[in-house]
Image (tube, grey):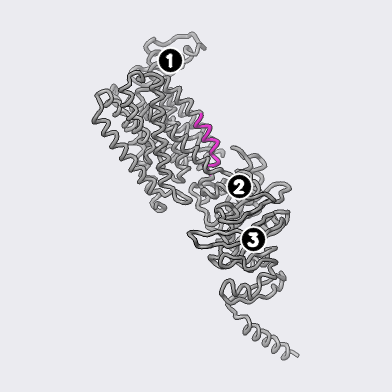
Amino acid sequence: MRKPTHILLVLAVLLLGSIVASCALGAVKVHPTEFVSILLNKFGWSDYNSFSAQQEAVIWVIRLPRVITSVLSGALLALSGVAIQGLFRNPLADPGIIGISSGAAMVASIAIVISGTFSFLQGTFAGISFLVIAAFAGSLLSAAGVFRIAREKTKTNVSTMLLAGIAINAIAGAVTGILIYISNEQQLRDLTFWTLGSLGGSTWTNAGILLVLLVVTYLVFFRLSKALNAFSLGEQEAQHIGISIESAKNRIIIFSSIAVGATVAFNGIIGFVGLVVPHILRITGSYNHRFLIPAAALGGGLLLSLSDLAARTLVAPAEIPVGIITALAGAPVFLFILLQQKHTFR
Amino acid sequence: MLEVRNISYGVRGKAILSNISFSVGPGKLVAILGPNGAGKSTLLKIISRELNALQGTIFFSGKELQSYSVEQLSLQRAVLTQSIQLSSRFEANEVVMMGRYPHFESFPSEKDKAIVNEVMQMTETYPYNDRIYQELSGGEQQRIQFARVMTQVRGENVFNRMLLLDEPLNNLDVRHQYKLLSIASEFSKNGNTVLTVLHDINLAAMYADEVILMAKGHVHSIGLPKDVITGENITSCYDFPARVESHPFHQCPVVYFGCPEETKTDSFFQQTELITTSNL
């Protein structure tokens, strides 16, 4: 495990660098030393003041919550990607591709339109919770549905899994279409944000909720790393080496759905993170989930924070929805895996 | 200690196993023999809890098999199934380490690592311990899987554990067929139980303490190899002419196929007689 430990270290350093760079770059430039100084001041560890009030406001109110949200969301998406791929015994199972994200977005969109009619829900913690729970329900429903449909006696039928994903994506597309048709202008803007994905709406509250979910999901999945490894032998064989497969499967489906549901609720659909990150980690590191799970948390955070940096700086002062960036980067990887799998694909 | 009582199984009204009963004491290696479709693998699957019997009960170490939790069972018995397809590209040693999964929480202890090394030396798989499983040959993969189940049941002063092997000799060369059976046999000698489906009757005759001969979902005969492996039993179960002699070195039964028993026997003796008389 020497090589994988090195990769974890490199990923951690890169992630830290990406956080600092993302906070420094943008319309208002903040030098890394100023950034550190702002943090030290905020935590009360230093009185030394080398920055302007504007810089402080930009960092504290806008950039830092956004960067942290991107790191946490990326980590959650990549973790759910790793877990779902382990469960399906197939590297093509991405929460976006098999319809989990769009299932979450569909139910969450309905929730937006409903909560639009109840003004007391808007912007409050109750409103946010309502949205998160709706998104979670949507992701859970589609994850469990796809798994049931695609599962044959001892293994998962990959083509059925992908086709079920297409079906769910189509249903979600239709429902979103209806919602767009009946919604007012504000709701329309919200819905567009959902389907393309953006980290623009990040707040400290969102980041806090995501942090709690990430810690829980990470701990659950790390404890399941043996089970995820064992699944690659086959379900029966996993049971013979002491894995309670039904409970492991349920935990994987529930916690991936929570992870995906929460990120979709706050950021809309950001595709391909769950696909690309585990794939790169497997070919550079190891297939062992004891490595893949911590590595996916770091790598997912790294990928999404860099993607969001690109999304808001490439065409500044305008912004590209981050889902477009991750799709541009991720779709070629998807095609590459497809080509690789051509021989075993069925 | 394994006790199988009146096990029956079937699919869609078609009986696959009917009323199977036998018991295996500790310290025994028992071979299940029989033609294709006799129900050997199904029986092993029921004993490993992959399938549920329609009728009957199984006792393992005095307790009903169904009363064990998955974890408890995995600490006391290991199962080698047929044709495992690994979906992840693990290194050989990582696959063998899976055998220790019941014994550690998240990180393997030094003892677990030592056992993996020991078993890989023993099964002669150590030379490719860091190779990718999918890049190994079929026989090498099979030996890795066997090493995995051996690490699962290995430990200090281990007894009353059970090994279930379904055609473990698939893809193995002669040397490793013997190697595998002698490792399994040694394991059984320390107070453990090995139950294995075999196709090679001669290897079963050499290594098994007891033989269960199955045909058409029934136990045809059960007992010591020399009592069960007879020309008559083998010929009728496999529907193929066979003749059984005593092995000149190992003193166990040895089967010759394709020779009709009586006529061959006659000509064989006539020939020996001829030679001896001419020599006199």
| Left or right for A140, reference B266 | left
* Residue A136 seen in the figure: yes
Closer to us: mark 1 or mark 2? 2
Report the magenta stretch's main SS: helix
Position in image of residue B216 (x %, y %):
56, 67
Position in image of residue A308 (x %, y %):
36, 27
Do the residues indicated by labels 1 and 2 lie within the same chain of the protein?
no
Report the front residue among B53 and B126. Answer: B53
Quick one: label 3 or label 2, which is nearer the N terminus? 3
Q: At x 31% / y 39%, what residue is drawn? A: A171
The reply to whether the magenta stretch includes residue A226 is: yes
Location of residue A327 (image quadrant): top left
Q: Residues within 10 Å of mark 1 (few under 14, many from 20)?
A: some
Image vertical order of residue B275 relative to residue A149, above or below: below
Question: Judging from the image, what secondary structure is the residue with disc 1 in?
Answer: helix
**Alpha carbons under labels 3 and 2: distance apart:** 30 Å
